[in-house]
Amino acid sequence: MTQLLAILVDTYRELSSRRLFWLSLALSALVVLGFALVGINEEGVQIVGWTLDIPFLNTRNIEAGEFYKLTFYGLGVRFWLGWLACLLALVSSAGLFPEMVAGGTVETLLARPVARSRIYLFKFLGGLLFTALQVTVFCVASFLVIGLRGNAWEPGIFVAVPMVTILYSYLFSVCALLGTWTRSGIAALLLTVLFWGFLFMLNVSEQMVNSFRLARVEELAAIDRTVEKRRQKDASVDISDLQAEREQGETGLEKLRTAHRILFMAKTVLPKTDETAALVQRWIVDAANLGDVSEEDAQGEGETPQRRRGRGSFGTTRARESDVRKAIERDMESRGVLWIVGTSLLFEAVVLGLGCRHFARRDF
Amino acid sequence: MADPAIELQTVRKTYGGGVHALRDAALRVERGEIFGLLGPNGAGKSTLVKVLLTVVRATEVAGTLLGRPIGEKAPLARVGYLPEHHRLPPYLTARQAVEFSGALSGVARVDRRRRAEALLDRVGLGHWKDRRVSTFSKGMRQRAGLAAALVNDPELVFLDEPTDGVDPVGRKEIRDLLVGLRSEGRTVFLNSHLLSEAEQVCDRVAILLQGRVVREGRLDDLQRQGARQELVLRWHGPVAELPGCHDAGPVDGDPSVRRHVLPTLDPAAAQPAIDAARRAGAMVISLTPCREGLESLFMKAVTDPVTGRPLPPGASS
């Protein structure tokens, strides 16, 4: 245990000796400061002393605590921790493994009474400390801001610490493998960022195709409802146009189902960074307190159901936008933690296994 | 007799592409001695040490290290190692680097703190303990590396070119340190191509060439193998046959002054030859005992006896 603790402490020392470590912390502080400067009142959003009059974003529609939690999630978790802080952490720690396997260093590590796989895994865990520490500091500061400004002492936001660390661990496992394999921090970083970009594109593609698929399902249901209505009025009415529309819709739906199945399978075996970050929102933001802002807004603008019906999202002409949106939300929420985090961790375990195997079998 | 520190019966290491770094190399290192592994660059010295320390996986290996099969991790807790071109973590102070090394070997915190303090004093870095390694000169880093190699109070220490980059005063101090380690009962395995240094401190040496041990033995014994006495005589008449000697030819091109070689260091063996020379009217100029230097031994070992050219060091396919 002494050896493993030493590797953890050394990794922390290595990371904290880098300027990026302190730069990340300073940027985190800036983000929290920015977060603290934004408030909400009855008229709208308040930034320092000025109030922006936003009709649907005020304390009449949303509680101050929920607003802060939403901001914490949208600005803090999704944007800062989920993207920029992770990228900074990757830049900072991409060199950890290449430096560990560099000549003159690796010999002193390997000629010890510690199994190589343990050295690899503890170096990896040490690397995760970087993110865990950054996220913890950010969450503590955000906790105080939400409590003091929004009067909502919400310990639930600390769920972001494990979730963002887990999210980062997917990417760092890839970075560690590539770093050990290529012995180059730059190559490891570039390839990992490329992989991350691929995951992002895959996620966007899957969500787009899924949205079109669900919209098409809603569209078919809307056609069925229209057929029903017409028949109720007049049983002998001609519905051939609707039948043709339905047949066309079913053909399109089948293609979308196939495409979605392929993308979904690819996502299942790969880490789901975006959805892991989204879990934080699922757990800390109470949707019931937010109200249906867009719908209220739409009605507030005087929009009628007839007008909305024709607008259509994701290529629909008959399905209501709110139905499509709800179907998409339901589908997203049906994706459980086990699928999102479990399969991603499985991917990570495989990548770590490959890294350990490579490190254990390689001559240095 | 106690178990040897290292008993290597055989080791083979073939890299991808059929490059043979080690081929059936065998050697034995006794406890409490300074053992020198010598050889030209590329002969396989570092690979051999790395195999012993599990840094490189051998294609085939049989033998023991501190009584345990080579390849086991447990005995490495009692081994110290200073690799060639080692790099201590630059973000650590000398004290932290030595303590980290101790922690990796499983030394308890209290012990490694105490030892780091004492060892840094011992290697001459007493005033630099809390300075970052990144600010050190090469010689200072080497000294810190030595302290790191010794922090686990090892029974066996592997030092790969320990005086690399160290000034002459520092080299002398390191040699004294090695002798001190031996007097404490530790075994020192020295990897070096600096023959003069090895000659000054080693009890036994092995010469590695083309992945094989071509010479091994006590330095005294090896040097004795080529030991001789050289009798230089001035002849005023014809050169006579001298008992136990062979005529090695004129000295400095003067045909009347000749060197005669007796293949022994025993002074008594030279007396009949001297008596015979005097009887023949020759004048004795000098009688010099000559031992074979390590450099000469080394050069003989690495030179092709037929062509007289250095043999390729190793790593051939």
Image (cartoon, rainbow, N blue to C red):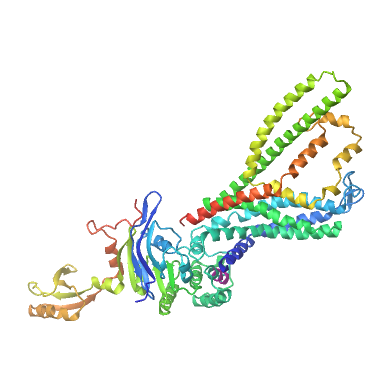
- Residue A311 percent coordinates (x, y): 82, 30
Q: Quadrant of residue A26?
A: bottom right
Q: State the residue in front, A200 or B172.
A: A200
A323 to B107, vertically: above or below: above
Q: Is residue B38 something one can see in this rendering?
A: no
Instruction: Identify the residue at image location x=68%, y=38%.
Output: A206
- Residue B218 percent coordinates (x, y): 30, 72
- Indicate left or right for A307 with B286 as reference: right
B46 to A310, vertically: above or below: below
Instruction: Identify the residue at image location x=23%, y=76%.
Output: B289
B231 to A180, vertically: above or below: below
Q: Which residues are magenta?
A: B95-100
* Quadrant of the rendering where the N terminus of chain B is positioned: bottom left
- Indicate left or right for B211 with A291 as reference: left
Give the mark count: 0
Q: Quadrant of residue A219?
A: top right
Give the main secondary structure of the magenta stretch.
helix
Asked if the magenta segment contains residue B97, the reply would be yes
